[in-house]
Image (spheres, rainbow, N blue to C red):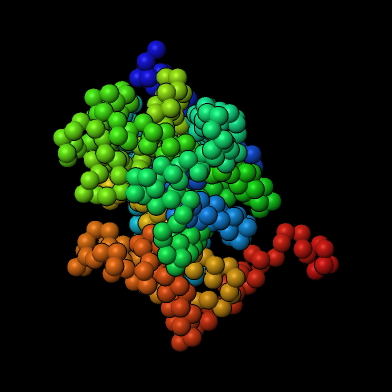
Amino acid sequence: MSVQTWTYILVGVTFTLYIGIAIYSRASSTKDFYVAGGGVSPLANGMATAADWMSAASFISMAGIISFAGYDGSVYLMGWTGGYVLLALLLAPYLRKFGKFTVPDFIGDRYYSKTARIVAVICALIVSFTYVAGQMRGVGVVFSRFLQVDIDTGVIIGMVIVLFYAVLGGMKGITYTQVAQYCVLIFAFMVPAIFISIQMTGNPIPQLGMGSTLNDGSGTFLLDKLDGLSTELGFNKYTNGSKSLTDVFAITLALMVGTAGLPHVIVRFFTVKKVKDARKSAGLALLLIAILFTTAPAVSVFARTNLINTVSEKEYSNMPVWFKNWEETGLLAFDDKNADGKIQYVADKQKNELTIDNDIMVLANPEIANLPAWVIALVAAGALAAALSTAAGLLLVISASVSHDLVKKVFNPNISDKAELWVARGSATVAVVIAGYFGINPPGFVAAVVALAFGLAAASFFPAIVLGIFYKKMNKEGAISGMIVGILLMLFYMTKFKFGWFGGGTQADWWLGISPEGFGSIAMIANFIVSIVVLQFTPEPPEYVQEIVENIRIPSGAGEATGH
């Protein structure tokens, strides 16, 4: 069977599974809709958290970035993995013990202020819409190639699917759908990686294959081969970095603390019964995430090596079918500048004739390696699972922020459970439409868009959450001021250097040499400073709030152990 036939079969089967789970697990109350009734097992929650966490950026774009950036791309691995550890150990158990559905709910109650809640809702919406734009872009990329529709149509198809199971099932439907999506995406990522590792090095473990010798009898290590190919074409050595240490540190820090402030990941720790279960599910999710994250560098090495060997100095007329298929999507383009019919793929922009979108590398990798059609189709199904699982989680955050944190907690405290559920579903519908627009008109490739969302989360939520848990004297005036300054500073920098607003600017104009992806760390520091300075000139929080903060840091059972 052809790749397209296999794609229709595998995508059709998986989508039917997701929709079936959503119908079976549909939400009948707001507690079901927001936190799956609070009764999810640690294993199921660990798998759902991993699927929620491993978005289109992890599946499609991370290995694509590493393929082109080489050593510099490792900042995404370090930042995202380290950030999850930070979230799981430092914040999740305390937030779970506080017992609130959403981050704005925590901030509104901890800082005893409707204004703090409204500011947090606005920040959550900005972060979530930025993040979900990357997911919708990922869905469009997959559909455009494998179902042979244009990217815009692909985004619309993805919108309809997500809307169906997110709006119908709420967190309950999404949780069990994400368990299935984790199984699909991890299988889809690992199978071609194992195939290609055996093909290139004879080693079935991709993580080891990346550092092994080629099985062509030359005795050359794969990474040495790639370094040689890269330098021949004028690129930096694959294993050498070109980013400044300052920017590497800033991006890594922004991704780490941004992870710890991501509302759609934090809410997952409210879906289990106990704080102990939150800790267990966090540990399980980390192990499940590590499978993909440790494989991504190997996939990027395999893809980059195969790409260079396939296209460099080759006749355009002899290019394989996969090349022509990706050209049709507009994500791969050949411009024969010297009219010799050969592809010049080099670092020199004046001479380079090949333009490659980062986001195609993982998806095209099995085709470049000439793997069976069912493996190629499997990767498409996995990429869609990764993008849709995270998009659904983000849409739930958006709908909960509107229905629970704004409508119920601010504007209409007496709203009935049934009416609140309708508001949640309505806001999710509106959110899908807006997300679709951003997916059709994205500000960049998937991982770059997602990295900006992490920067926004770092700049706004992280200081307010950390100070709210660990500093009982932190008051509402400090937290509100810090969040406003942090998010506005990050938005200003991001729009100036990414979109050319406020006079624009080039890389030479970056403040302290820090890229927009890393600037969240600077905005976060500004948030901390403003919060603490404002605190010095404003009243302490009420005694009952300080008491709450003391209590959430006391481990369960401590009273029995100490005799108090």
- The residue drawn where x is 25% and y is 44% is 352
Q: Horizontal placement of 40 versus 414: left or right?
A: right
- The residue drawn where x is 54% and y is 71% is 467
Q: Horizontal placement of 310 versus 300: left or right?
A: left
Where residue 411 appears, as percent x and y from the top left, is 36, 59
Q: Nearer the viewer, residue 444 or 29?
A: 444
Q: Quadrant of the C terminus?
A: bottom right
Q: Nearer the viewer, residue 267 or 1?
A: 1
Is residue 45 among the parts visible in the rendering? no
Is residue 233 among the parts visible in the rendering? yes
Which image quadrant for residue 499? bottom left
Where residue 215 appears, as percent x and y from the top left, is 55, 29
Where residue 136 appears, as percent x and y from the top left, is 34, 41
Q: Horizontal placement of 308 versus 187: left or right?
A: left
Q: How many marks?
A: 0
- Extreme residue toward the bottom, this view: 537
Where residue 99 appears, as percent x and y from the top left, is 58, 56
- The residue drawn where x is 58% and y is 58% is 86
Which image quadrant for residue 344? top left
- The residue drawn where x is 18% and y is 33% is 340
Q: Quadrant of the N terminus?
A: top left
Q: Nearer the viewer, residue 534 or 38?
A: 534
- Extreme residue toward the top, this view: 1
Which image quadrant for residue 511? bottom left
